[in-house]
Image: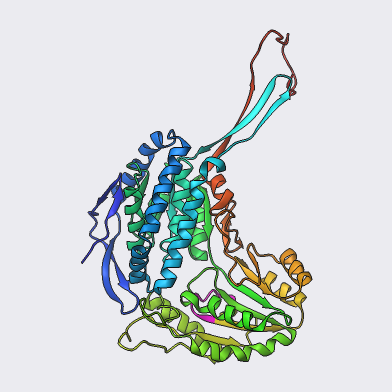
C-alpha cells in the first residue's frame, strides 16, 4: 500500500509517523493509499526549510520567479491528462470534470507569470520641493495553505503559485481525503526547477493544521472549506498575529425572471446544481422562480431524470460519486429532512447506485419544490446534487430573500431585461454575480470575492487582491540635498 510522502526542503521523504489516514476511491471505497499524519518535528522541519529558503528566494529577481512559473505552467499543460487521471482516482470526478479542475488551476499559474507587472509600486516626483515618494511591494515570508477535498488541483494552485511568484515560500497542507493530486503538483513544481524549500508539503489532520497556525514563522494562512473550520482557522490565525483568508460555506441562489430564455435556464440549472455531485462552493443550490417562470419547475423533472452518475472514464456519466460514505449519509439525511418538513421531492436520488459498484458513494440528482426559508434544506449547505426550488412574485422579493441569507459566495440572475439585471447586480449583497451565467467564478485576473459567512478575512484569492495578501508595501520619501539646504529645525509635520 502506497504511503504518501512529505515534501520537505526539496526532497520527498517518508513520514516517520505511525498514524495514517486511508485514501479511498469513492466509486468503491477501496483504499488506494495511506496519508501520514505528519509529526510535529516534521512540520517544524518543513517550516524551517521554508524560512531558510526565503532568505535567498526573496532576493531572486521577480523575472526569474516568473520564468519558474512559465516552466511550471508548461509542465502542467503537458501532464494535464495524467494529473486529471490521478485526481479522478481519489475524488471520483469524471475525467472531463477533473480536467476542468486542473485547467482552472493552470489559469492561476498564468496569472502568477504576470508577477513583474503585478508587483510594480507607485511613485510621485516632487511631493514637496526636491522630495520624491515611491513605494515597493515586498514578500511576507513563510505562507501556508490548507486546502479542501473538492478541488485538489485548482485550489492549491490558487495559493502557492501566487505566493511564491511574489517572493514568499510556502507550506501546503492538502486535504487528507485526496493528497495524491497535490503531491503530483508539487513533483512537477520541483521538476520545473523550484529551489529547495520554496514549496513544502505536509499531510495530516487538525493536529497538523494547528502546528502551522501556532507557528511563529508562518506569516499568512489561506484556507478553503466549511464555515466552522473557516471560523476556527481565521480566529486562531489572527490571534497568532497572522494574515488569514478563509473561504467557507455557500448557499448560492439563481433568480429566474419570466422573460429569461427557458431552454438556457433549465439546462444551466441542471449542470450548475448537480455537476461534480454538487460538491462545489459555487454550485447553484437554490432556484428562485419569479412570477410565471415558476411553471418551469415541472419541466426540470425529465432533465433531472436523464442525469446519470457514473465512473470517471464513462463518457456518458454526468458526474461521479460523493467523496465519502459520511458525505453520502449527510446528503441522504438532508433529503429525508426536506420531505419531513413539507418540501415536495419531485426527483429523489438518495438510493441511486451504479451496477458493479454498489458500495460506492453514489447519489442521484434530487429536485425539491415548495421549499421555504425555514427548512433545513434551505438553511444549510447540503454539498450534494440537490436543487431546491422556491417561488416569489417579484424581483424585489427575490432580492430580499437572497440578501437575508447568511451566505454571500455567488448568485446569478437569468433575464432578458437590462434594467432587471442592473437592479439585481446593484442591490444584491453577494460577492460574485452572474448575469445569464450560472456559476460566476471569475477568471484569475480578477479576484474570488465571496461575502458574509462565505469568507473570513480582508483580501481574497488570486487576482490583484492575492498579490496584496501575500505582500507588504514599503513607502519611501527621499530628498537628496544639493546647495539649497534649509536652515534651522522644522518643527511642523509639513515637508519643506
Q: Quadrant of the N terminus?
A: bottom left
Q: Which of the 4 image quarters holds residue 14?
A: bottom left
Point out residue 475 in the picture as x, y percentages from the top left corner: 61, 31
Q: Which residues are magenta?
A: 379-386
Location of residue 188 with respect to 86 vertically, above or below: above
Point out residue 160 in the picture as x, y percentages from the top left corner: 44, 50
Residue 448 visible from this viewpoint: yes
Point out residue 68 in the picture as x, y percentages from the top left corner: 40, 44
Residue 220 visible from this viewpoint: no
Q: Residue at x 50, y 64 (%)?
A: 228
From the viewer's side, name the closer residue of 292 and 30. 292
From the viewer's side, name the closer residue of 358 and 338. 358
Location of residue 272 with respect to 121 vertically, above or below: below
Location of residue 72 with respect to 293 vertically, above or below: above
> Is 385 inside the magenta-drawn segment?
yes
Q: Main secondary structure of the magenta part?
A: loop
Q: Residue at x 73, y 22 (%)?
A: 495
Q: Quadrant of the C terminus?
A: top right
Question: 125 left or right of 236?
Answer: right
From the viewer's side, name the closer residue of 139 and 378. 139
Amino acid at each position: 500500500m502506497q504511503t504518501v510522502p512529505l515534501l520537505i526542503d526539496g526532497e520527498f521523504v517518508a513520514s516517520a509517523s505511525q498514524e495514517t489516514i486511508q485514501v479511498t476511491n469513492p466509486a468503491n471505497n477501496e483504499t488506494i493509499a495511506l496519508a501520514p499524519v505528519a509529526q510535529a518535528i516534521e512540520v517544524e522541519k518543513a517550516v524551517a526549510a521554508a524560512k531558510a529558503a526565503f532568505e535567498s528566494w526573496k532576493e531572486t529577481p521577480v523575472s526569474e520567479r516568473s520564468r519558474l512559473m512559465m516552466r511550471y505552467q508548461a509542465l502542467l499543460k503537458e501532464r494535464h491528462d495524467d494529473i486529471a487521471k490521478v485526481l479522478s482516482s481519489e475524488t471520483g470526478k469524471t475525467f472531463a470534470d477533473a480536467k476542468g479542475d486542473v485547467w482552472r488551476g493552470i489559469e492561476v499559474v498564468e496569472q502568477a507569470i504576470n508577477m513583474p507587472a503585478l508587483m510594480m509600486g507607485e511613485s510621485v516626483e516632487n511631493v514637496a520641493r526636491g522630495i520624491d515618494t515611491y513605494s515597493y511591494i515586498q514578500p511576507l515570508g513563510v505562507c501556508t495553505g490548507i486546502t479542501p477535498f473538492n478541488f485538489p488541483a485548482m485550489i492549491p494552485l490558487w495559493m502557492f503559485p501566487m505566493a511564491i511568484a511574489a517572493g514568499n515560500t510556502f507550506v501546503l497542507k492538502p486535504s487528507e481525503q485526496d493528497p495524491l493530486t497535490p503531491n503530483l503538483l508539487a513533483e512537477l513544481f520541483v521538476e520545473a526547477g523550484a529551489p529547495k524549500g520554496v514549496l513544502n508539503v505536509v499531510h495530516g489532520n487538525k493536529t497538523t493544521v494547528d502546528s502551522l497556525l501556532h507557528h511563529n514563522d508562518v506569516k499568512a494562512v489561506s484556507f478553503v472549506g466549511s464555515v466552522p473550520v473557516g471560523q476556527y482557522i481565521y480566529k486562531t490565525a489572527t490571534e497568532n498575529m497572522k494574515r488569514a483568508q478563509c473561504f467557507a460555506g455557500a448557499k448560492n441562489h439563481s433568480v429566474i425572471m419570466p422573460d429569461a430564455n427557458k431552454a438556457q435556464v433549465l439546462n444551466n440549472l441542471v449542470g450548475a446544481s448537480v455537476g461534480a455531485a454538487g460538491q462545489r462552493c459555487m454550485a447553484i443550490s437554490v432556484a428562485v422562480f419569479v412570477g410565471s417562470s415558476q411553471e418551469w419547475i415541472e419541466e426540470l423533472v425529465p432533465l433531472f431524470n436523464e442525469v446519470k452518475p457514473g465512473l470517471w472514464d464513462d463518457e456518458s456519466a454526468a458526474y461521479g460519486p460523493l467523496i465519502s460514505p459520511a458525505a453520502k449519509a449527510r446528503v441522504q439525511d438532508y433529503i429525508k429532512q426536506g420531505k419531513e418538513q413539507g418540501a415536495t421531492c419531485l426527483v429523489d436520488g438518495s438510493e441511486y447506485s451504479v451496477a458493479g459498484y454498489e458500495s460506492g458513494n453514489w447519489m442521484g440528482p434530487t429536485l425539491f419544490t415548495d421549499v421555504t426559508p425555514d427548512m433545513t434544506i434551505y438553511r444549510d449547505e447540503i454539498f450534494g446534487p440537490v436543487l431546491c426550488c422556491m417561488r416569489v412574485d417579484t424581483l424585489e422579493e427575490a432580492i430580499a430573500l437572497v440578501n437575508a441569507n447568511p451566505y454571500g459566495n455567488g448568485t446569478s440572475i437569468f433575464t432578458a431585461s437590462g434594467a432587471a439585471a442592473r437592479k439585481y447586480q446593484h442591490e444584491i449583497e453577494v460577492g460574485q454575480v452572474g448575469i445569464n451565467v450560472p456559476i460566476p467564478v471569475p477568471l484569475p485576473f480578477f479576484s474570488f470575492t465571496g461575502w458574509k459567512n462565505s469568507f473570513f478575512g480582508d483580501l481574497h484569492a488570486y487576482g490583484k487582491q492575492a498579490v496584496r495578501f501575500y505582500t507588504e508595501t514599503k513607502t519611501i520619501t527621499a530628498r537628496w540635498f544639493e546647495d539649497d539646504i534649509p536652515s534651522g529645525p522644522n518643527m511642523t509635520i509639513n515637508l519643506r
